[in-house]
C-alpha cells in the first residue's frame, strides 16, 4: 500500500473515533448525507468541525469519506480443477469528498477515489483505479422543486436493477452527465444524458467524453403515501461494438419499463417489468424482463426475521439465424447482482432466489439460495458486466445452484465488518462444457465511514 494510503487511513480512524458518539447516518451516495446536526453545535471537536465548516452568509463546507478493505478468495473460479484456479487477493478503496454549499441555490461536490488491489492474477477494469475523480459536479436549485446538475456523477435509478453505482466491485461506475430534476414530495422526475466513464488503472487517466457509449432517459416516480411507489421510465443506450452470443455489432436500444414497490401489512414488494426495442447491427431488438420480489416479516423462536423470494425471467436470443435479437441488456446493473461471487449476470436467465435474513442488535445475517437456468438454449450465459462468459455450446438449460451466507457486525455507525460466502454447484449446462467442479468464494469486508 502506498505511504499516503497509511496517512489517510490514520486520519479516517482518528476522525471516526472522535465521531462515534454521534448518531450518524451515512448515505450510499455521500452527497445525500445530512450534516445539519452539526450546524448549531458549539465547541465542536476535530471531527465535528470537519463535518460542518461555517463560512458565513449561509455558506458551509463539509468533508467526509470512507476506507474499505477486503480479502477475497476463489477456489475453482471457473468450475474446473484441470488448472490452478485458486486465488486470494486484497483490495483497498479510499474515498474522500468535500461538499460546498453557497447560499440556497448552488452546491459543489467533489469525491476522490483510490482503488488498489494486490495478488490478483487477472485484473478486470473494476479492480484497480489508483487515483481518479469519482464525482465532481455542480448543482443549481431554482426552488424547492427544480434543480440542474452538471458534471461527473454516480447514478442509481429505482432499486438499482438496471442502473446502479456498482458498489460491490472495487471501482464505482461514474457518468459525465447533465440532469434536470423535479421533486415536489409526491412526484419526482429526472431527465438526463450522460457518457459512462471508461476506467483505467492509473492516476487521473480515465477516458472521458467518449461518445462510443451514450446513455439518457426520463425516469418518473409517483408516491402514494408512505407505503407505495410507482415508477415509469424510458431509457436509451447506444453502445458501439457490443458483444452478444450472436456476434459483435453496434447496439442501439430503448428500454420502456415500470416498477411498483411498497408494503402491505407485514408484506413488502418490489416488482418491475421492462421491454426493449431497437437495433443490433442489421437485426431488430425485441427483449424483455419481469422481476418480482416479495418479503414478509416473521417470528421464529422469538427472533424477528424477514423471509423473501426473488424471481426473474430475463429473455435471451431465440434463434441466431433470424433477423431479431432477443437478448436483454440490463444496462448498468450492480456488479454483485447475485452476490459478490458474480459468476452470472442478468441476461438470458431464469432464477429463483429465496432468502432469510435478520438483524439481532449489532449482528445481521442472511442465508440465500439461487437456482439458475438459461432462458434460451440458443443463447449463452453472461457475466455481471454483461460480457459473454459461457457461449451456447450445448442444449442444456440448467446452469447451477448457488448457496450463500452474509454475516455482518456493526461496531459503531462508523465501522462495520461483513463476511460473505458462496458455493456454486454446476448444473447440466456447465457440466456439458466440462466445467463440473464445485466453486467456492468468500470475501471479508471491513469499512470505515466518516
Image (cartoon, rainbow, N blue to C red):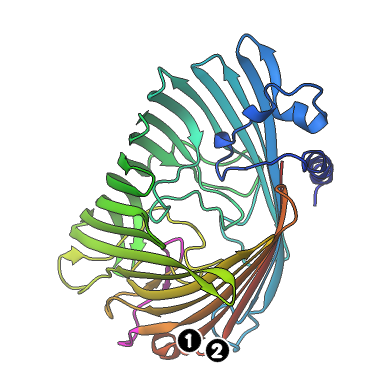
Q: Is residue 351 above or below residue 417?
A: below
Q: CA distance from mark 2 to mark 1?
A: 7 Å
Q: Is residue 181 above or below residue 160?
A: above
Q: What residue is drawn where x is 64% and y is 19%?
A: 60
Name the residue tied to disc 2: 437
Quarter-wise, where is residue 351 in the image? bottom left
Q: What residue is drawn where x is 55% and y is 89%?
A: 437
SS type, badge 2: loop
Circle nearer the N terminus (2, 1): 1
Look at the image and tell me whether residue 37 can be seen. yes
Q: Is residue 387 magenta?
A: yes
Q: Position of residue 307 (x, y in %)?
A: 47, 71
Q: What residue is drawn where x is 48% and y is 86%?
A: 426
Name the residue tied to disc 1: 426
Categorize mark 2 by other alpha carbons within 10 Å: few (<14), some (14-19), many (20+).
Answer: some
Q: Which residues are magenta?
A: 384-397
Asked whether, in this view, residue 201 is left or right of residue 346, the answer is right
Look at the image and tell me whether residue 390 can be seen. no
Asked if the residues shown at circle 2 and circle 1 are in contact, with their CB atoms under 8 angstroms apart, the answer is yes
Quarter-wise, where is residue 234 in the image? top left
Asked whether, in this view, residue 345 is left or right of residue 411, the answer is left
Q: Nearer the viewer, residue 446 or 279?
A: 446
Q: Is residue 212 above or below residue 439?
A: above
Q: Position of residue 160 (x, y in %)?
A: 43, 52
Amino acid at each position: 500500500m502506498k505511504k499516503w494510503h497509511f496517512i489517510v487511513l490514520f486520519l479516517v480512524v482518528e476522525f471516526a473515533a472522535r465521531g462515534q458518539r454521534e448518531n450518524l447516518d451515512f448515505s450510499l451516495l455521500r452527497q445525500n448525507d445530512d450534516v445539519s446536526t452539526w450546524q448549531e453545535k458549539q465547541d465542536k471537536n476535530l471531527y465535528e468541525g470537519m463535518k460542518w465548516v461555517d463560512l458565513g452568509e449561509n455558506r458551509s463546507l463539509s468533508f467526509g469519506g470512507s476506507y474499505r478493505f477486503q480479502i477475497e478468495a476463489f477456489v475453482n473460479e471457473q468450475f474446473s480443477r484441470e488448472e490452478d484456479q485458486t486465488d486470494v487477493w486484497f483490495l483497498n478503496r479510499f474515498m474522500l469528498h468535500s461538499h460546498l454549499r453557497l447560499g440556497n441555490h448552488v452546491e459543489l461536490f467533489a469525491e476522490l477515489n483510490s482503488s488498489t488491489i494486490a495478488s490478483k492474477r487477472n485484473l478486470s477494469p473494476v479492480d484497480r483505479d489508483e487515483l481518479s475523480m469519482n464525482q465532481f459536479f455542480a448543482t443549481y436549485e431554482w426552488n424547492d422543486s427544480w434543480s440542474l446538475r452538471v458534471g461527473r456523477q454516480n447514478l442509481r435509478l429505482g432499486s438499482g436493477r438496471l442502473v446502479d453505482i456498482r458498489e460491490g466491485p472495487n471501482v464505482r461506475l461514474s457518468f459525465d452527465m447533465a440532469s434536470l430534476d423535479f421533486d415536489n414530495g409526491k412526484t419526482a422526475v429526472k431527465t438526463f444524458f450522460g457518457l459512462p466513464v471508461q476506467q483505467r488503472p492509473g492516476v487521473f487517466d480515465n477516458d472521458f467524453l467518449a461518445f462510443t457509449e451514450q446513455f439518457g432517459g426520463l425516469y418518473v416516480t409517483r408516491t402514494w403515501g408512505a407505503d407505495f411507489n410507482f415508477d415509469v421510465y424510458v431509457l436509451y443506450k447506444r453502445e458501439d461494438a457490443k458483444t452478444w452470443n450472436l456476434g459483435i455489432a453496434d447496439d442501439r436500444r430503448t428500454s420502456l419499463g415500470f416498477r411498483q414497490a411498497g408494503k402491505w401489512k407485514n408484506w413488502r414488494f418490489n416488482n418491475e417489468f421492462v421491454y426493449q426495442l431497437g437495433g443490433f447491427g442489421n437485426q431488430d431488438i425485441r427483449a424483455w424482463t419481469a422481476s418480482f420480489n416479495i418479503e414478509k416479516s416473521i417470528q421464529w423462536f422469538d427472533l424477528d426475521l424477514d423471509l423473501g423470494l426473488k424471481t426473474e425471467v430475463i429473455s435471451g436470443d431465440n434463434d441466431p439465424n433470424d433477423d431479431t435479437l432477443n437478448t436483454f441488456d440490463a444496462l448498468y446493473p450492480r456488479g454483485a447482482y447475485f452476490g459478490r461471487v458474480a459468476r452470472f449476470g442478468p441476461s438470458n436467465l431464469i432464477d429463483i432466489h429465496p432468502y432469510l435474513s435478520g438483524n439481532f442488535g449489532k449482528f445481521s445475517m442472511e442465508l440465500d439460495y439461487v437456482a439458475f437456468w438459461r432462458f434460451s438454449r440458443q443463447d449463452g450465459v453472461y457475466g455481471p458486466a454483461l460480457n459473454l462468459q459461457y457461449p451456447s455450446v450445448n442444449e442444456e438449460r440448467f446452469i447451477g445452484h448457488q448457496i450463500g451466507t452474509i454475516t455482518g457486525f456493526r461496531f459503531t455507525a462508523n465501522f462495520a465488518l461483513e463476511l460473505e460466502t458462496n458455493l456454486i454447484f454446476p448444473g447440466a449446462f456447465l457440466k456439458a462444457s466440462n466445467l463440473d467442479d464445485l466453486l467456492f468464494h468468500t470475501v471479508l469486508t471491513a469499512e470505515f465511514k466518516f
